[in-house]
């Protein structure tokens, strides 16, 4: 295992300890609102500090992009961190949230960790070395038909600028798939695509820390990822489609007519 991946796993587990302790007494949580339906807790901040402290010890010259503290440093290496993806789930005691840590080298994703603290499921990948769940190699599903597929998504909750396009896609996919799911933590949704629990996923308006680690998990598990046109611009646009190769292309065919070039 690459030393940088080992460090990321150690950091994710350390953050997971912070989150797990706090989950035992949710009534004591201090919660503030960043914007409509977008929450942050002291746990988010403590978990992020734990991750950054460990990364800084190991790689003091690396740059960091983190959800709570933003961007810092300049380097060919950048860590992309969501210390608690699924904060709304967490504060409600809904057990679907995770720690997400990705590393990009010259803008190319090279290492990824998604840690599901409630199930102690550790997803990880390094570019060119495959994707794993708890030390077992994982692959995307083999389903070839959209009507037999289970597809993940995320509902708009901060920006509703493109909600009509989203609802049109949702309506069509509801009729053309085996089912749609919105668990509420994008990093875990992408990890589920990587291990075949979901056959595909799409969402608008994500942040880089929502996607970075999960996107590498999918590609290293044999899947495809892209923006709403299938291009590799998702970290910039915030719009994401992923899946096994057959379902990825079929999702794009459904999505394209509804976005009409307005979204990448």
Image: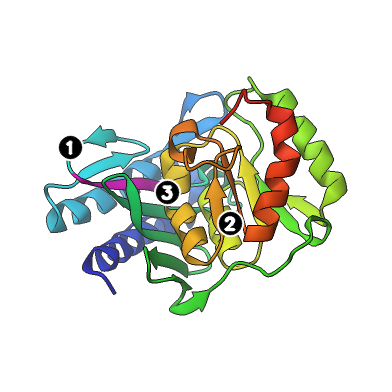
Give the side of residue 178 with respect to residue 213, left or right.
right
Q: Residue at x 17, y 42 (%)?
A: 75
Q: Earlier in the sequence, mark 3 or mark 2?
A: 2
Q: Residue at x 76, y 50 (%)?
A: 180
SS assignment at label 3: helix
The residue beneath circle 3 is 212
- In the rendered view, would you say 73 is above or below 62? above
Asked if disc 1 and disc 3 are in contact, CB closer than 8 Å, the reply is: no
Q: Earlier in the sequence, mark 2 or mark 1?
A: 1
Alpha carbons under labels 2 and 1: distance apart: 34 Å
Label 1: how many Cα within 10 Å (few below 14, some 14–19, many 20+): few
Residue 113, located in which quarter of the rendered image? Answer: bottom left
Q: Nearer the viewer, residue 121 or 79?
A: 79
Q: Residue at x 55, y 36 (%)?
A: 239
Residue 4: give x, y in percent of width and height: 24, 63
Q: Nearer the viewer, residue 183 or 46?
A: 183
Q: Which residues are magenta?
A: 76-83
Of badges 2 and 1, nearer the viewer stands: 1
Residue 22 seen from this side: no
Asked if disc 2 and disc 1 are in contact, CB closer than 8 Å, the reply is: no
Tell me the number on the disc at residue 233: none
Alpha carbons under labels 3 and 2: distance apart: 22 Å
Label 3: how many Cα within 10 Å (few below 14, some 14–19, many 20+): many
The residue beneath circle 1 is 73
Question: Quick check: is 81 in the magenta stretch?
Answer: yes
Q: Assign the magenta stretch its main secondary structure.
A: strand
Label 2: how many Cα within 10 Å (few below 14, some 14–19, many 20+): some
The residue beneath circle 2 is 95
Residue 22: give x, y in percent of width and height: 42, 53
- In the rendered view, would you say 232 is above or below 112? above
């Amino acid at each position: 295992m690459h030393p940088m991946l080992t460090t990321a796993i150690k950091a994710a587990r350390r953050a997971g300890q912070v989150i797990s302790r706090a989950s035992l007494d949710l009534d004591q949580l201090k919660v503030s609102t960043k914007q409509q339906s977008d929450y942050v807790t002291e746990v988010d901040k403590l978990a992020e500090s734990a991750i950054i402290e460990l990364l800084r010890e190991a790689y003091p010259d690396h740059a960091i992009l983190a959800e709570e503290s933003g961007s810092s440093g300049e380097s060919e290496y950048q860590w992309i961190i969501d210390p608690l993806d699924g904060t709304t789930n967490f504060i409600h005691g809904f057990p679907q949230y995770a720690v997400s840590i990705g590393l990009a080298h010259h803008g190319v994703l090279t290492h990824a960790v998604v840690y599901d603290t409630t199930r102690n499921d550790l997803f990880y990948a390094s570019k060119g070395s495959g994707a794993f769940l708890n030390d077992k190699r994982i692959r995307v599903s083999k389903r070839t038909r959209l009507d037999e597929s289970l597809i993940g998504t995320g509902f708009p909750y901060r920006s509703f600028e493109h909600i009509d396009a989203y609802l049109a896609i949702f309506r069509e996919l509801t009729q053309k798939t085996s089912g749609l799911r919105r668990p509420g933590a994008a990093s875990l949704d992408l990890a589920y695509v990587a291990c075949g629990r979901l056959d595909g996923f799409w969402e608008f308006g994500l942040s880089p820390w929502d996607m970075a680690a999960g996107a590498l998990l999918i590609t290293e598990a044999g899947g495809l990822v892209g923006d709403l046109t299938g291009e590799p611009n998702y970290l910039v646009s915030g719009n994401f489609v992923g899946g096994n190769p057959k379902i990825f292309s079929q999702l794009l065919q459904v999505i394209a007519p509804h976005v009409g070039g307005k979204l990448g």
